[in-house]
Image (cartoon, rainbow, N blue to C red):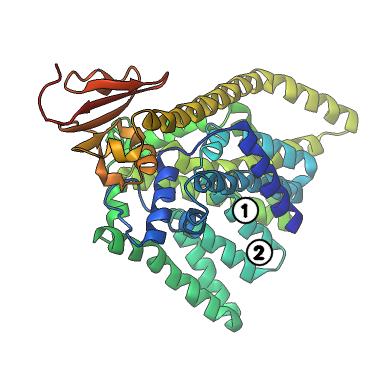
Amino acid sequence: MRWIFAGCLVAAALSLLLGGRPTYDPWAWIIWGREITEGNLDTRSGPSWKPLPMLFTVPFALAGDDAAPGLWLVVARAGGLLALAMVFRLGARLAGPVAGVVAVAGVFFSEGFVRHAARGFSEGLLVGLVLLAVDRHLAGQRWAAFTAGLGAALLRPEVWPFWGLYGLWLGWTDPRARALVGAGFAAIPLGWFLPEYLGSGNPLRAAARALEPNLNSPAFADRPFLAVLDSSQSVLGAPIYVAALAGVFVLLGHRRRGSNAPEDDLLVMLACGAVLLMIGVGLMTEAGFAGNLRYVVLPAALLCLLAGAGVVGVLRALPTRAVAALAGVAMMAAAAPQAQAELDRFRFEMREVRSEDDFERRLRKTIGLVGGPAAVTSCGGVFTSRFQVPAVAWHLHRHQRDVEIFPFPPGWTLAPRNSQLSQDPRFARVAETRKWIVGRNCDGQPSS
């Protein structure tokens, strides 16, 4: 197991050579880490709070502004690699290495998985920790399973019921673990609510912020529950869904024959977990939460494991190895068009990651052209486009609430080229690069 962790960290560090910078939510976590070290945490603006990233971004802030973003990317990308490693490990445990490969392919090419990990989101880390918890439970290491589950619970609230029930069971069956369980249960309110209270005065601000989704969110549909289920279909390719359905039928066949194999019990757990998690995401969307596709990465990973077992189960049910080999070739041929489409999407996502890297790096250069952060904050407010607020705040060493999206002179604009803000006639253009335009109006009068 230690080799998995070491390999993930090394591979993630090497991945930094490919470029990429954090995106909106990760930038906020990095900013909050710096603010905690400086004793001025302010969470009144930005995305929802997440406790686990702070365990990394706080010490990373001590390494300086140049190093902190890259260090978090190492963690996020290592989390994505850990997810793939654990998917293969559990897939192989279920039905052999072929099942592991199928499951890994499904997760790797699921919509946004690589892009999210490359940009610093925590969904890969979430999948890795949940599957690590499952793996450690199967290995008889219940304390380690509970601890890995705690990490996941510090990332997503929909994990709380599963982890909480496991903690109650662990405390009931192992009295020695009760101190660990108690500490874990205490860490949830301390990690989720206390920092928000200190940073914003509202311990439930994260929940309130999550109830402010983007306009294209399924939360605004007539039937949000059904809308999020419908939009989630694109996360995985059709072959994975078909293979997962085959996995269900294989499992039912085993049960009908009276099989009590541990692998079948694991399949039941994975299938039920995927269904319950999707129901949870749907209910949260119905209640007004965003219902982003990132939220279904975990149930999608569980479906990929079921799909791997389904493919192998179908092949094993065939009469001879020759027939199974032919069937395997037929399956690959049938999946080839989808595989090509997924490869094309993967290439597009990688171009997007590199483009964002260039975009953000030019922001720092642009700020330098006009005299640095001190100059940009010398008069009035600072204004930028909505999704650039955390990045601008980071490079100006300001709170996120100090960077606004509705421009009113006096002040400065740091606007992406071709954005509406970059053409605002009230702010005289004082500098520009290939990706950014800086405007200034320090007297509050219309620009001449």
Q: Is residue 276 visible?
A: yes
Other residues around mark 2 within 10 Å, as few (<14) / some (14–19) / many (≥20): some
Rendered view: 157 above or below 14: below
- The number of callouts visible is 2
Q: Which mark is residue 169?
A: none
Residue identified by numbered label 2: 137
Q: Where residue 404 sits: x, y (%)?
A: 24, 37
Asked which secondary structure carries label 2, the reply is: helix
- Tell me which residue sits at (59%, 78%) in the image: 173
Give neighbour class at mark 1: few <14, some 14-19, many 20+ (Cα, 10 Å): many
- Residue type indicated by callout 2: His
Which picture quadrant has residue 226?
A: top left
Residue 44 on image: x %, y %:
26, 52
| Any part of residue 244 in sight | no
Label 1 and label 2: CA atoms lie apart by 10 Å
- Residue 193 lies left or right of residue 276; in this view the side is left
Give yes or no for contact between labels 1 and 2 (Cβ–Cβ under 8 Å): no
**SS label for mark 1:** helix
Q: Amino acid at mark 1?
A: Leu
